Image: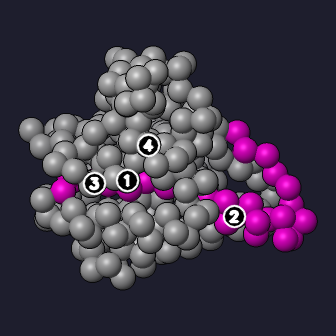
């Protein structure tokens, strides 16, 4: 079955305009011969600057901002949607066939009674992938009680999409390294093939907690860089010990 790389775009990478340009260029250069990819993102650092400018200084729990009011919630939702548009615009500028998807579109994400996240209606996303379109999916879900749209951890969104799409693909969760190395360095100067989740630090990836969260699922996890994912004959990097 065809592999699908579900890439978690952390807020540190999203805050770097040069990264978005490089991402778009790598995807464009890989072309239709490159790996099938789906990009997942949350609010990024932009929303923090927006909130701080208005005098709000919320913490993050599980990668999600702890909003304290309806006004803050709306700002976060708007920021997530704008990040989605920025990623799509960068890819479109490089003539990459892409589509922006908010997690609330067509009821894609749904919160279950136990609090878990489910991608309840992913067939149309699968159809896009088979047409070699790059979906850019935001981690937004509608609260089942209030109807308010809220951000969820990107790791949860990656897991939900991976589970929903495994009937058509072999999904692999991808986390990008802090620097340019396509994985975790070995003592010999190369890249380690496999590591335990607890061996991953913030020197390796911007948010090690995301790696550990993904390791709790059944999805294979690959730690790599843009070059490692898209620049060679096939994706390379460090895989988590299953």
- Cα distance between the residues tagged 3 and 4: 13 Å
Residue 86 or residue 228, whichever sits in front: 228
Which of discs 3 and 2 lies nearer the camera? The answer is 3
**Nearer the N terminus, badge 1 or badge 4?**
4
- Disc 3 designates what residue? 230
- Cα distance between the residues tagged 3 and 2: 29 Å
- Cα distance between the residues tagged 4 and 2: 28 Å
Question: CB under 8 Å between callouts 1 and 2?
Answer: no
Q: Is residue 109 left or right of residue 45?
A: left
- Cα distance between the residues tagged 3 and 1: 6 Å
Magenta segment boundaries in residue numbering: 34-61
- Disc 1 designates what residue? 226
Which of discs 1 and 2 lies nearer the camera? The answer is 1
Residue sticking out furthest to the left: 1
Which of discs 3 and 4 lies nearer the camera? The answer is 4
Question: CB under 8 Å between callouts 3 and 1?
Answer: yes
Q: Tell me the quarter of the image containing the C terminus.
A: top left
**Nearer the N terminus, badge 3 or badge 2?**
2
| Residue name at image x 9 percent, y 38 percent | 1
Q: Give the SS element for disc 2.
A: helix
């Amino acid at each position: 079955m065809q592999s699908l790389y579900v890439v978690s775009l952390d807020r540190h990478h999203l805050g770097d305009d040069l990264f978005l340009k490089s991402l778009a260029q790598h995807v464009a250069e890989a072309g239709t011969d490159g790996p099938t990819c789906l990009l997942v993102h949350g609010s990024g650092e932009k929303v923090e600057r927006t909130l701080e400018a208005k005098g709000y200084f919320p913490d993050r729990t599980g990668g999600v901002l702890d909003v304290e009011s309806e006004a803050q919630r709306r700002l976060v939702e708007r920021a997530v949607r704008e990040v989605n548009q920025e990623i799509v615009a960068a890819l479109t500028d490089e003539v990459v066939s892409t589509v922006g998807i908010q997690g609330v579109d067509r009821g894609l994400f749904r919160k279950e009674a136990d609090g878990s996240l489910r991608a309840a209606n992913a067939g149309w996303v699968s159809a896009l992938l088979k047409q070699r379109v790059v979906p850019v999916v935001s981690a937004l879900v509608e609260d089942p009680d209030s109807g308010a749209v809220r951000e969820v951890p990107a790791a949860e969104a990656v897991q939900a999409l991976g589970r929903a799409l495994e009937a058509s693909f072999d999904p692999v969760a991808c986390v990008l390294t802090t620097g340019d190395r396509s994985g975790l360095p070995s003592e010999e100067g190369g890249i380690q093939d496999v590591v335990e989740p607890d061996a991953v630090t913030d020197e390796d990836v911007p948010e090690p907690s995301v790696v550990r969260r993904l390791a709790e699922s059944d999805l294979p996890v690959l730690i790599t860089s843009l070059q490692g994912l898209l620049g060679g004959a096939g994706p390379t990097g460090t895989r988590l010990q299953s």
